[in-house]
Image (cartoon, rainbow, N blue to C red):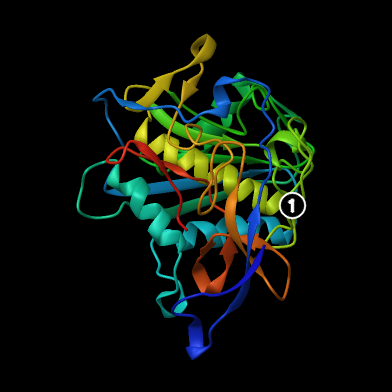
Amino acid sequence: MVLWGRISGAPHGLLALSLLLLLLLAIPNATAESEQVSVLVDHGGEMLHGNLDLSIVFYGQFGRIQKNALRAFLKSLNQKAPGGAEPSVSSWWHMVSSYTQNDKDIDVRVVQQYVDPNYAHGKVMTRDFIKILVEKALVGFPHAVPVIVAARDVTVEGLCIGRCSEHGDIDGKPYVILGNPETECPGACAWPFHKADYGPPGPVLKPPSGDVGADAMVISLASGLASVVSNPFRTGLFLLGHKGTVIEATTACPGMFGTGATPRHTGKLFVDIRTGGAYNAIGFKGKKFLLPALWNPKTQSCWTVM
């Protein structure tokens, strides 16, 4: 069924026209556990709050669209969409900030961007390699959270095995790392913009920026930030799942994005009538994004920004 919808508060007094589609797609994951919502537990450990300074490491060669998509997403976290349009990226971030039980949203600032287009440490990102990059990202900004973004021709050790981004800490310093799903297990980590590796067949969505890698990385970055805020040292909001898998704020709600979503099904999403890109949130300068569902501790259920 296709419905016509309007985005409230569109910029310049114009109402952005979108298609509202019911998309029934399967998230690619072979384990039965990931096909149901997991109830997370707050273990009482430290969460990140207040100011969240990020030091971004672009490792390898990136196109302009991919860098700009990630930067625009980060700028959108603390900025209202033009004209107060909803659903917005800042509303999504408000839910993440609520995990810390503070009245004010976490203020995200990119304090440094480090670019290594020459692959100084090779094209296979091992644990030792990650430690070196984290240390470089912290030079001059010891309290920042490094966010390491790998180029399409870099393999990240540990990714694709049930997760598309990772966070951890090195010597008590939290970090986030994500690969480029354009080539790093696209059937799992670029879904729903790429054909799924598992599950029943369904339509492949067009990414809002027009670049599969860019918008899939935005989903991975959003997931990584939500997890590093709510569970930076594996003592916060999480659940130990099958074989010790750590289930967190977004992985508790696998493959859920829009209204009426259930695990393995995206739910209802907006589709930009001009570009055909599927999205559920509006951000900086009217940019459109697809953001994952989040665990809502108050309702003990999954929450989507739509």
**Residue appearing at x 58%, y 56% in the figure:** 268
Whether residue 142 appears in this view of the structure is no
Residue 96: % across, % down: 37, 46
Determine the residue located farthest toward the front in the rendered image.
1
**Residue appearing at x 35%, y 35% in the figure:** 230
Residue, disc 1: 212
Quadrant including the N terminus: bottom right
As drawn, is 272 to the left or to the right of 302? Answer: right
Residue 218: % across, % down: 59, 50
Determine the residue located farthest toward the bottom in the rendered image.
13
Q: Is residue 127 above or below residue 251?
A: above
Whether residue 226 appears in this view of the structure is yes
Could you say which is closer to the camera, residue 14 or residue 77? 14
Residue 297: % across, % down: 30, 37
Which residue type carries mark 1?
Answer: Val
Determine the residue located farthest toward the top in the rendered image.
243
Q: Is residue 6 above or below residue 124?
A: below
Q: Residues within 10 Å of mark 1 (few under 14, many from 20)?
A: many
Residue 233: % across, % down: 37, 24
As drawn, is 89 to the left or to the right of 124? Answer: left
Q: Is residue 99 above or below residue 305?
A: above
Q: Is residue 78 above or below residue 197?
A: below
Could you say which is closer to the camera, residue 46 or residue 99? 99
